[in-house]
Image (cartoon, grey):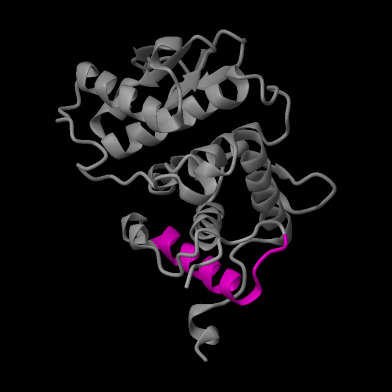
Amino acid sequence: MFDWLFGSGCPLDPAAKEWVENRLVWLRDEFGPDDLYSGAVVLPTPAFFPDPYDGSRRAARVLFARVCDYMGVDPELLRLEFFRPSPNALFLVNDTGEALPTGAAGWYAGDRIRINEDELADPMSLVGTLAHELAHQRLLGEDRIGHEVFDNELLTDLTVVFKGMGIFLANVPRHWDGNYTYWPGTELRKPEYMTGPMFGYALALLAWVRGEPSPAWARYVKSGVRGELRQGLRFLNKHGTDKLRPLRRRG
């Protein structure tokens, strides 16, 4: 009745919608269905992060160990390092020769993860950055994809959602201004990183396949993306998708 007011269409253009659905299927097939259908949705609460946090490197290392656990990564595989951007340098260069802006939150360098010290002041942002870099380990470090794939960073973001930590990236919009190219074979713009609507629809799919019409955890998603999440759920409850199947409810 109120579709005109709240919106019941998909919050994404067709190319982005297809990419989110297809890549969630790929992640399910690559990592198994448990994360998608029954894995924990990690929340910014003491239940998931009980350790005190004071913005120090030591506290960040404790946080890193927890995020490793949630992302399914052995923390002994990676060395966590920190860097302080130089105000006089425009770019940093990582071990593969890739130029990175000095404002980069972090990067994955194979055997280590480097984190911008500015991230230490905001634990929500820090957790999102750590989860993103650890998703690179799950994908690149485990030889599931190569650096050259067109959706490397997008898939890395979606892997964070798949592993239950999408709220932390959805709540920190620093990546939404990434460079835009085009989705292959279309004239539709493709972002470098997932946008707010993409996070909203991906989180909606996560709730929908689990049979959660109104997930309690949605209140932890920032208001803008939460609106996209709810719009995505209205769309999925009305139209569904042929790419994924929801759990059947008992009784």
Q: Position of residue 122 (x, y in %)?
A: 27, 35
Give the image quarter of residue 82. Answer: top left
Magenta-tinted stretch: 224-242
In the displayed orientation, state which residue is furthest to the front.
251
Q: Is residue 100 above or below residue 94?
A: below
Residue at (50% x, 88% y) in the render: 2
Q: Is residue 178 left or right of residue 130?
A: right
Q: Is residue 60 above or below residue 161?
A: above
Q: Nearer the viewer, residue 107 or 29?
A: 29
Q: Position of residue 185 (x, y in %)?
A: 85, 47
In the displayed orientation, state which residue is furthest to the right.
185
Residue at (51% x, 19% y) in the render: 108
Q: Is residue 52 left or right of residue 179?
A: left
Residue at (31% x, 39% y) in the render: 124
Residue at (34% x, 57% y) in the render: 217
Query: Is residue 101 in sight in this rendering?
Result: yes
Q: Position of residue 48 (x, y in %)?
A: 27, 40
- The verdict on residue 211 being magenta is no
Q: Is residue 75 left or right of residue 177?
A: left
Q: Nearer the viewer, residue 246 or 191?
A: 246
